[in-house]
Each structure stands twice: as structure tokens, then as C-alpha cells.
Amino acid sequence: MYKLLLPNKYKKIGWGMLIPATVLGIFLMLTGFEGMPVKAKVFSIFNDEIFGKSQFFTFTYTNITNTVVGVLFIAGGLLVGFSKEKNEDEYIGNLRQSSLLWAVLVNYILLFISFVFIYGTAFLNVMLYNMFTVLIIFIFRFNYVLYRNEKSLSGEKYH
């Protein structure tokens, strides 16, 4: 399991990407994803426009703001979530594994609830955000469990 983890130094780089991407993502959500359009010509494997034709392997001129924010968020989240801790050991590996399992379970419970109770375009938003929830829940859960354990261990040292 430890062979798949990145060196600890990548965690800081990840936070440096994840935090601004989160702030920008929230800003874009609040502005209807039109807050600050950045347009560019990009290569597309498949492009299906609403009132246009479907195209394969072509260049298209489009707003890439969501793409840039999403890529930064995913890359930053992966660096944060899958970089070793300073003192990575078997216990932390077990915490990491249980946090990941917990995140997947909670994510699918939330997705199940969404399937049953959310409809229309709101459901499309749920599916959009669902791309990020496993990573978000994992990072929160893992860091919370690490913090809680460090706090309880530091309390034992003084007693």
C-alpha cells in the first residue's frame, strides 16, 4: 500500500492547488458558472453541442474555466489525499484505508438518497458534484481521524 503513496512534500503542493480551486469552484457555483469565463481553443475527443452537430477529434473554442478549476481540484485533492504523512506507518495506513472505505460508503449513501429524492436539473447538479465527493469526504475524514488521534496521543504524554 505504501508504494502507491507519493512523498510527503507533494501534500503542500496539493493544498496549494486544492484550496484556491475550492474557493474558485464555490465562486463559480454562486455565479451560475459564468463568474469569470476563460475561453480558449482546445482539442476535443468528442464535442456535442446542444444546437450543433456532434464532432469527434476536433478543436473547439470554448469556456475552459470549469475545466481548469476541476483539474486543479482533482489534482490537488489527489496530492493531498495520497501523499505520505511525515511519519507514515502501518497504523496511519490503516486509518487511510478505513477513511477511504468510509468515504466511498458515505458517498454512495448520499448518491442513493439523491436518486430517490432529487429530480430534474437539480439531479444533474448532484451528479456533477458527485465527481468530487469521494475525494472531499476522504480528505476530511482522514485528516479528522489523524487530528483526533494526535490530540489523544498528546494528552497521554502529559498524564
Image (cartoon, rainbow, N blue to C red):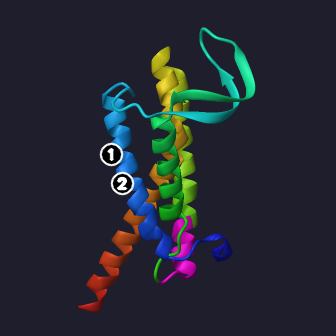
Q: Where is residue 12 in the image (x, y as percent from the top left)?
A: 41, 69
Q: Position of residue 44 (x, y in %)?
A: 67, 33
Location of mark 2 (residue) = 19
Residue toward you, 46 or 32: 46
The three-letter amino acid code for the residue at tag 2 is: Ile
The three-letter amino acid code for the residue at tag 1 is: Val
In the image, the segment drawn in magenta is 87-96
**Residue in the picture at 62% in, 27% down:** 60
Residue furthest out toward the right? 56
Label disc, if present, on residue 23 of the rendered structure: 1
Residue toward you, 47 or 127: 47
Q: Residue 90 vs residue 57: left or right? A: left
**Residue in the picture at 26% in, 83% down:** 155
Label disc, if present, on residue 55 of the rendered structure: none
Say if mark 2 contacts mark 1, CB within 8 Å. Answer: yes
Q: Position of residue 78 (x, y in %)?
A: 54, 58
Local packing at callout 1 (Cα closer than 10 Å; few below 14, some 14-19, many 20+) is: few
Q: In which quarter of the image is residue 93?
A: bottom right
- Residue 148's place in the image compared with 78, above or below, is below
Which secondary structure lies at badge 1? helix
